[in-house]
Image (cartoon, rainbow, N blue to C red):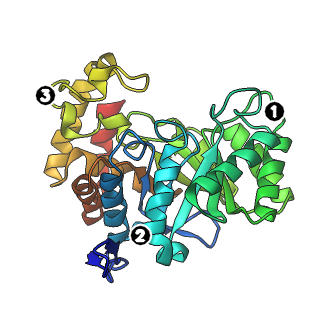
Amino acid sequence: MQINDKSGVQNYQANEKRYDTMAYNRVGKSGILLPALSIGLWHNFGFVDSIQNGRDILRTAFDLGITHFDLANNYGPPYGSAEENFGTILKSDFRPYRDELFIATKAGYDMWPGPYGNLGSRKYLISSLDQSLKRMGLDYVDIFYHHRPDPDTPLEETMGALADIVRQGKALYVGISNYQATEADKAAKILKELNVPFILHQARYSMFDRWVEDKLLDTLEQNGVGCIAFSPLAQGMLTDRYLKGIPKGSRAAKDLTYLNTETVNTNIEKIQLLNAVALKRDQKLSQMAIAWILRQPQVASVLIGASSANQLKENVKVLDCLDFSEEELKLIDNIVS
Protein backbone atom coordinates (compact mmCIF):
# COMPACT_ATOMS: atom_id res chain seq x y z
CA MET A 1 0.00 0.00 0.00
CA GLN A 2 1.25 3.48 -0.83
CA ILE A 3 0.17 6.93 0.33
CA ASN A 4 1.34 10.36 -0.73
CA ASP A 5 2.53 13.02 1.68
CA LYS A 6 2.05 16.74 1.06
CA SER A 7 5.29 16.96 -0.88
CA GLY A 8 4.05 14.41 -3.39
CA VAL A 9 6.59 11.79 -2.31
CA GLN A 10 5.21 8.29 -2.13
CA ASN A 11 5.46 6.81 1.37
CA TYR A 12 4.90 3.21 2.28
CA GLN A 13 2.26 2.02 4.71
CA ALA A 14 2.33 -1.70 5.45
CA ASN A 15 -0.67 -3.93 4.88
CA GLU A 16 -2.56 -4.17 8.17
CA LYS A 17 -3.28 -7.86 7.53
CA ARG A 18 0.32 -8.78 6.81
CA TYR A 19 0.53 -11.39 9.57
CA ASP A 20 -2.75 -13.16 8.80
CA THR A 21 -1.61 -15.71 6.22
CA MET A 22 2.16 -16.21 6.57
CA ALA A 23 3.35 -19.29 8.48
CA TYR A 24 6.06 -18.75 11.12
CA ASN A 25 8.43 -21.46 12.34
CA ARG A 26 10.51 -21.80 15.47
CA VAL A 27 14.27 -21.40 14.90
CA GLY A 28 15.94 -24.31 16.67
CA LYS A 29 15.51 -23.89 20.43
CA SER A 30 15.58 -20.11 20.31
CA GLY A 31 12.83 -17.59 20.94
CA ILE A 32 12.81 -16.51 17.30
CA LEU A 33 10.11 -17.31 14.77
CA LEU A 34 10.92 -16.84 11.10
CA PRO A 35 8.49 -16.65 8.19
CA ALA A 36 8.38 -19.86 6.16
CA LEU A 37 9.73 -17.79 3.28
CA SER A 38 12.46 -15.18 3.69
CA ILE A 39 13.66 -12.72 1.06
CA GLY A 40 17.28 -12.74 -0.10
CA LEU A 41 19.01 -9.73 -1.65
CA TRP A 42 21.83 -11.62 -3.38
CA HIS A 43 20.51 -10.65 -6.84
CA ASN A 44 18.43 -7.71 -8.10
CA PHE A 45 19.41 -5.20 -5.41
CA GLY A 46 22.81 -3.90 -6.56
CA PHE A 47 23.70 -0.60 -8.19
CA VAL A 48 23.29 -2.30 -11.60
CA ASP A 49 19.63 -2.96 -10.77
CA SER A 50 16.52 -0.78 -10.48
CA ILE A 51 16.17 0.41 -6.90
CA GLN A 52 12.47 1.01 -7.52
CA ASN A 53 12.02 -2.63 -8.49
CA GLY A 54 13.90 -3.63 -5.34
CA ARG A 55 11.65 -1.37 -3.30
CA ASP A 56 8.54 -2.96 -4.84
CA ILE A 57 9.85 -6.44 -4.00
CA LEU A 58 10.58 -5.58 -0.37
CA ARG A 59 7.27 -3.79 0.11
CA THR A 60 5.42 -6.76 -1.34
CA ALA A 61 7.41 -9.15 0.84
CA PHE A 62 6.55 -7.31 4.05
CA ASP A 63 2.91 -6.92 3.02
CA LEU A 64 2.82 -10.72 2.69
CA GLY A 65 4.23 -11.23 6.18
CA ILE A 66 7.87 -11.80 5.21
CA THR A 67 9.81 -10.19 8.04
CA HIS A 68 13.27 -11.63 7.35
CA PHE A 69 15.55 -9.74 4.92
CA ASP A 70 18.87 -11.45 4.19
CA LEU A 71 21.98 -9.60 2.97
CA ALA A 72 25.76 -9.98 2.90
CA ASN A 73 28.67 -7.57 2.61
CA ASN A 74 29.50 -8.68 -0.95
CA TYR A 75 25.99 -8.66 -2.42
CA GLY A 76 25.59 -6.39 -5.42
CA PRO A 77 27.23 -5.92 -7.82
CA PRO A 78 29.35 -4.05 -6.96
CA TYR A 79 30.20 -5.33 -3.49
CA GLY A 80 28.32 -3.48 -0.77
CA SER A 81 25.73 -2.00 -3.10
CA ALA A 82 22.86 -4.26 -2.03
CA GLU A 83 23.37 -3.16 1.57
CA GLU A 84 23.55 0.48 0.52
CA ASN A 85 20.39 0.24 -1.59
CA PHE A 86 18.68 -1.61 1.23
CA GLY A 87 19.69 1.16 3.61
CA THR A 88 18.08 3.71 1.30
CA ILE A 89 14.85 1.70 1.13
CA LEU A 90 14.90 1.07 4.88
CA LYS A 91 15.16 4.79 5.56
CA SER A 92 12.37 5.75 3.14
CA ASP A 93 9.93 2.89 3.77
CA PHE A 94 10.70 0.60 6.68
CA ARG A 95 12.14 2.74 9.47
CA PRO A 96 8.81 2.74 11.39
CA TYR A 97 8.78 -1.07 11.14
CA ARG A 98 12.36 -1.77 12.22
CA ASP A 99 11.33 -3.77 15.28
CA GLU A 100 9.12 -5.99 13.11
CA LEU A 101 12.04 -6.92 10.85
CA PHE A 102 14.72 -9.58 11.27
CA ILE A 103 17.69 -8.29 9.25
CA ALA A 104 20.75 -10.41 8.47
CA THR A 105 24.13 -9.76 6.99
CA LYS A 106 27.31 -11.82 6.59
CA ALA A 107 31.05 -11.70 6.05
CA GLY A 108 33.42 -14.35 4.81
CA TYR A 109 34.07 -13.83 1.11
CA ASP A 110 36.51 -11.48 -0.59
CA MET A 111 35.46 -7.90 0.10
CA TRP A 112 38.41 -5.50 -0.13
CA PRO A 113 42.09 -5.70 -1.19
CA GLY A 114 44.85 -6.88 1.09
CA PRO A 115 45.14 -9.61 3.70
CA TYR A 116 42.34 -8.36 5.99
CA GLY A 117 39.37 -8.32 3.61
CA ASN A 118 38.50 -12.00 3.40
CA LEU A 119 37.72 -15.25 5.26
CA GLY A 120 37.39 -15.45 9.04
CA SER A 121 39.82 -13.36 11.06
CA ARG A 122 38.61 -11.27 13.98
CA LYS A 123 39.82 -8.10 12.21
CA TYR A 124 37.92 -8.88 9.02
CA LEU A 125 34.62 -9.86 10.66
CA ILE A 126 34.39 -6.87 13.00
CA SER A 127 35.57 -4.38 10.36
CA SER A 128 33.17 -5.81 7.80
CA LEU A 129 30.16 -5.60 10.09
CA ASP A 130 31.03 -2.00 10.99
CA GLN A 131 31.02 -1.18 7.27
CA SER A 132 27.75 -3.07 6.72
CA LEU A 133 25.99 -1.22 9.54
CA LYS A 134 27.14 2.10 8.10
CA ARG A 135 25.91 1.19 4.60
CA MET A 136 22.50 0.12 5.90
CA GLY A 137 22.15 2.93 8.43
CA LEU A 138 21.62 0.49 11.29
CA ASP A 139 22.86 0.34 14.87
CA TYR A 140 22.65 -3.46 14.86
CA VAL A 141 21.59 -6.43 12.77
CA ASP A 142 19.36 -9.16 14.13
CA ILE A 143 21.75 -11.89 13.01
CA PHE A 144 25.32 -11.83 11.73
CA TYR A 145 26.76 -14.85 9.91
CA HIS A 146 30.21 -16.10 9.20
CA HIS A 147 29.60 -16.73 5.52
CA ARG A 148 31.97 -19.67 4.97
CA PRO A 149 34.58 -21.68 6.88
CA ASP A 150 38.16 -20.41 6.97
CA PRO A 151 40.59 -23.36 6.85
CA ASP A 152 43.51 -21.30 8.17
CA THR A 153 42.03 -19.24 10.98
CA PRO A 154 41.40 -21.07 14.28
CA LEU A 155 37.68 -21.63 14.77
CA GLU A 156 38.07 -20.22 18.28
CA GLU A 157 39.13 -16.87 16.82
CA THR A 158 36.24 -16.71 14.37
CA MET A 159 33.62 -17.74 16.92
CA GLY A 160 35.20 -15.44 19.52
CA ALA A 161 34.76 -12.53 17.13
CA LEU A 162 31.07 -13.42 16.70
CA ALA A 163 30.72 -13.55 20.48
CA ASP A 164 32.25 -10.10 20.92
CA ILE A 165 30.04 -8.70 18.16
CA VAL A 166 26.99 -9.77 20.18
CA ARG A 167 28.47 -8.36 23.39
CA GLN A 168 29.13 -5.06 21.62
CA GLY A 169 25.44 -4.88 20.69
CA LYS A 170 26.11 -5.00 16.95
CA ALA A 171 24.13 -8.23 16.46
CA LEU A 172 21.46 -9.94 18.55
CA TYR A 173 22.18 -13.46 17.29
CA VAL A 174 24.89 -15.18 15.27
CA GLY A 175 24.92 -17.83 12.59
CA ILE A 176 27.18 -19.68 10.20
CA SER A 177 26.83 -20.61 6.55
CA ASN A 178 28.27 -23.31 4.30
CA TYR A 179 29.82 -25.25 7.19
CA GLN A 180 30.01 -29.04 7.06
CA ALA A 181 28.44 -31.02 9.92
CA THR A 182 31.70 -31.56 11.85
CA GLU A 183 32.66 -27.88 11.62
CA ALA A 184 29.15 -26.78 12.59
CA ASP A 185 29.21 -29.04 15.65
CA LYS A 186 32.55 -27.59 16.79
CA ALA A 187 31.29 -24.04 16.24
CA ALA A 188 28.15 -24.77 18.25
CA LYS A 189 30.15 -26.11 21.18
CA ILE A 190 32.49 -23.10 21.22
CA LEU A 191 29.61 -20.64 21.06
CA LYS A 192 27.72 -22.50 23.78
CA GLU A 193 30.74 -22.19 26.08
CA LEU A 194 30.85 -18.48 25.27
CA ASN A 195 27.12 -18.20 26.05
CA VAL A 196 26.38 -16.72 22.64
CA PRO A 197 22.95 -17.13 20.98
CA PHE A 198 23.89 -19.23 17.93
CA ILE A 199 20.58 -19.96 16.23
CA LEU A 200 20.95 -20.50 12.46
CA HIS A 201 22.98 -22.31 9.85
CA GLN A 202 22.38 -21.10 6.31
CA ALA A 203 22.91 -23.95 3.87
CA ARG A 204 22.41 -24.63 0.19
CA TYR A 205 19.56 -27.13 -0.13
CA SER A 206 17.32 -28.24 -2.97
CA MET A 207 15.96 -31.39 -4.58
CA PHE A 208 19.12 -31.42 -6.69
CA ASP A 209 21.49 -30.66 -3.81
CA ARG A 210 20.69 -32.73 -0.71
CA TRP A 211 24.04 -32.76 1.08
CA VAL A 212 22.53 -31.37 4.30
CA GLU A 213 20.49 -34.54 4.76
CA ASP A 214 23.60 -36.64 5.32
CA LYS A 215 24.62 -35.35 8.75
CA LEU A 216 24.13 -31.62 8.96
CA LEU A 217 20.41 -31.45 9.77
CA ASP A 218 20.78 -33.98 12.59
CA THR A 219 23.82 -32.12 13.94
CA LEU A 220 21.91 -28.84 13.99
CA GLU A 221 18.95 -30.42 15.74
CA GLN A 222 21.21 -31.91 18.41
CA ASN A 223 22.64 -28.45 19.07
CA GLY A 224 19.30 -26.64 19.06
CA VAL A 225 20.19 -24.73 15.90
CA GLY A 226 17.78 -24.09 13.04
CA CYS A 227 18.47 -24.29 9.32
CA ILE A 228 17.59 -21.74 6.67
CA ALA A 229 17.90 -23.04 3.13
CA PHE A 230 19.23 -21.01 0.21
CA SER A 231 19.17 -21.80 -3.53
CA PRO A 232 15.98 -23.88 -3.08
CA LEU A 233 15.29 -23.69 -6.81
CA ALA A 234 18.78 -24.83 -7.83
CA GLN A 235 19.55 -21.46 -9.42
CA GLY A 236 16.32 -21.56 -11.40
CA MET A 237 16.41 -25.14 -12.65
CA LEU A 238 13.48 -26.08 -10.41
CA THR A 239 11.14 -23.66 -12.16
CA ASP A 240 9.28 -23.70 -15.45
CA ARG A 241 12.05 -21.63 -17.07
CA TYR A 242 13.98 -24.55 -18.53
CA LEU A 243 11.19 -27.01 -19.31
CA LYS A 244 11.62 -26.54 -23.05
CA GLY A 245 15.32 -25.82 -23.23
CA ILE A 246 17.53 -22.88 -22.37
CA PRO A 247 15.99 -19.49 -23.20
CA LYS A 248 18.15 -16.57 -24.29
CA GLY A 249 19.05 -14.25 -21.45
CA SER A 250 18.62 -16.91 -18.76
CA ARG A 251 21.30 -17.62 -16.16
CA ALA A 252 22.23 -20.89 -17.83
CA ALA A 253 22.58 -19.18 -21.21
CA LYS A 254 25.16 -16.85 -19.67
CA ASP A 255 27.18 -19.88 -18.47
CA LEU A 256 27.69 -18.44 -15.00
CA THR A 257 29.89 -20.27 -12.54
CA TYR A 258 26.91 -21.50 -10.53
CA LEU A 259 24.73 -22.54 -13.49
CA ASN A 260 25.59 -23.46 -17.06
CA THR A 261 24.07 -25.13 -20.09
CA GLU A 262 25.64 -28.49 -19.32
CA THR A 263 24.12 -28.62 -15.85
CA VAL A 264 20.65 -27.80 -17.19
CA ASN A 265 20.89 -30.26 -20.06
CA THR A 266 21.99 -33.01 -17.68
CA ASN A 267 18.93 -32.44 -15.50
CA ILE A 268 16.30 -31.55 -18.09
CA GLU A 269 14.51 -34.92 -17.97
CA LYS A 270 14.33 -34.78 -14.17
CA ILE A 271 13.00 -31.22 -14.35
CA GLN A 272 10.23 -32.28 -16.69
CA LEU A 273 9.27 -35.28 -14.55
CA LEU A 274 9.22 -33.18 -11.40
CA ASN A 275 7.07 -30.60 -13.16
CA ALA A 276 4.53 -33.34 -13.93
CA VAL A 277 4.37 -34.19 -10.21
CA ALA A 278 3.87 -30.53 -9.35
CA LEU A 279 1.04 -30.13 -11.85
CA LYS A 280 -0.80 -33.04 -10.27
CA ARG A 281 -0.51 -31.17 -6.96
CA ASP A 282 -1.93 -28.03 -8.64
CA GLN A 283 1.38 -26.28 -8.03
CA LYS A 284 4.14 -24.75 -10.06
CA LEU A 285 7.42 -26.64 -9.94
CA SER A 286 9.01 -23.80 -7.97
CA GLN A 287 6.26 -23.94 -5.37
CA MET A 288 6.61 -27.71 -4.95
CA ALA A 289 10.39 -27.41 -4.65
CA ILE A 290 10.04 -24.92 -1.78
CA ALA A 291 7.35 -26.99 -0.04
CA TRP A 292 9.57 -30.07 -0.30
CA ILE A 293 12.29 -28.30 1.72
CA LEU A 294 9.87 -26.93 4.29
CA ARG A 295 8.74 -30.45 5.15
CA GLN A 296 12.02 -30.89 7.07
CA PRO A 297 11.40 -30.08 10.75
CA GLN A 298 14.88 -28.55 11.16
CA VAL A 299 14.24 -26.01 8.38
CA ALA A 300 12.84 -22.81 9.86
CA SER A 301 12.70 -20.86 6.60
CA VAL A 302 13.50 -21.05 2.90
CA LEU A 303 15.42 -18.13 1.46
CA ILE A 304 14.11 -17.06 -1.92
CA GLY A 305 15.14 -14.40 -4.38
CA ALA A 306 12.79 -12.51 -6.62
CA SER A 307 13.22 -10.46 -9.76
CA SER A 308 9.75 -8.93 -9.43
CA ALA A 309 6.94 -8.50 -6.95
CA ASN A 310 4.72 -10.78 -9.03
CA GLN A 311 7.29 -13.58 -8.93
CA LEU A 312 7.42 -13.27 -5.16
CA LYS A 313 3.62 -13.47 -4.92
CA GLU A 314 3.66 -16.67 -6.97
CA ASN A 315 6.20 -18.33 -4.70
CA VAL A 316 4.31 -17.37 -1.54
CA LYS A 317 1.37 -19.41 -2.84
CA VAL A 318 3.40 -22.45 -1.75
CA LEU A 319 1.73 -21.99 1.64
CA ASP A 320 -1.53 -23.23 0.10
CA CYS A 321 -0.10 -26.75 -0.30
CA LEU A 322 2.74 -27.80 1.99
CA ASP A 323 1.84 -31.44 2.65
CA PHE A 324 3.14 -34.42 0.68
CA SER A 325 1.84 -37.96 0.50
CA GLU A 326 4.28 -40.83 0.99
CA GLU A 327 3.70 -41.75 -2.64
CA GLU A 328 4.69 -38.26 -3.81
CA LEU A 329 7.85 -38.26 -1.71
CA LYS A 330 8.90 -41.65 -3.03
CA LEU A 331 8.24 -40.54 -6.60
CA ILE A 332 10.34 -37.40 -6.12
CA ASP A 333 13.16 -39.47 -4.59
CA ASN A 334 13.09 -41.84 -7.56
CA ILE A 335 13.23 -38.94 -10.03
CA VAL A 336 16.11 -37.05 -8.41
CA SER A 337 18.20 -40.03 -7.29
* Image quarter of residue 166: bottom right
Disc 1 crowd, CA 10 A, few/some/many (<14, 14-19, 20+): few
| Residue on which disc 2 sits | 93
In the picture, measured across the screen, residue 286 lies left or right of residue 28, that is: left
Image marks 3 and 1: residues in contact by CB distance under 8 Å:
no
Along the viewing direction, whichever of 129 and 195 lies nearer the viewer: 129
In the picture, measured across the screen, residue 199 lies left or right of residue 18, that is: right
Residue 45: image tag:
none
Dot 2 amino acid type: Asp
Rendered location of residue 262, percent (x, y): 31, 16
Q: Nearer the viewer, mark 2 or mark 3?
A: 2
7 up-or-down from 270: above or below:
below
In the picture, measured across the screen, residue 100 lies left or right of residue 133, that is: left
Along the viewing direction, whichever of 167 and 263 lies nearer the viewer: 167
Q: Is mark 1 on a helix, strand or loop?
A: loop
Q: Is mark 2 on a helix, strand or loop?
A: helix
Rendered location of residue 61, percent (x, y): 35, 63
Q: Earlier in the sequence, mark 1 or mark 2?
A: 2
Q: Is mark 3 on a helix, strand or loop?
A: loop
Direction top: furthest residue: 262
CA–CA distance between discs 2 and 3? 40 Å
Residue placed at 81% from the left, 33% from the top? 153
> Which quarter of the rendered picture does the C terminus lie within?
top left
| Residue on which disc 3 sits | 244
Along the viewing direction, whichever of 144 and 48 lies nearer the viewer: 48
Residue 153: image tag:
1
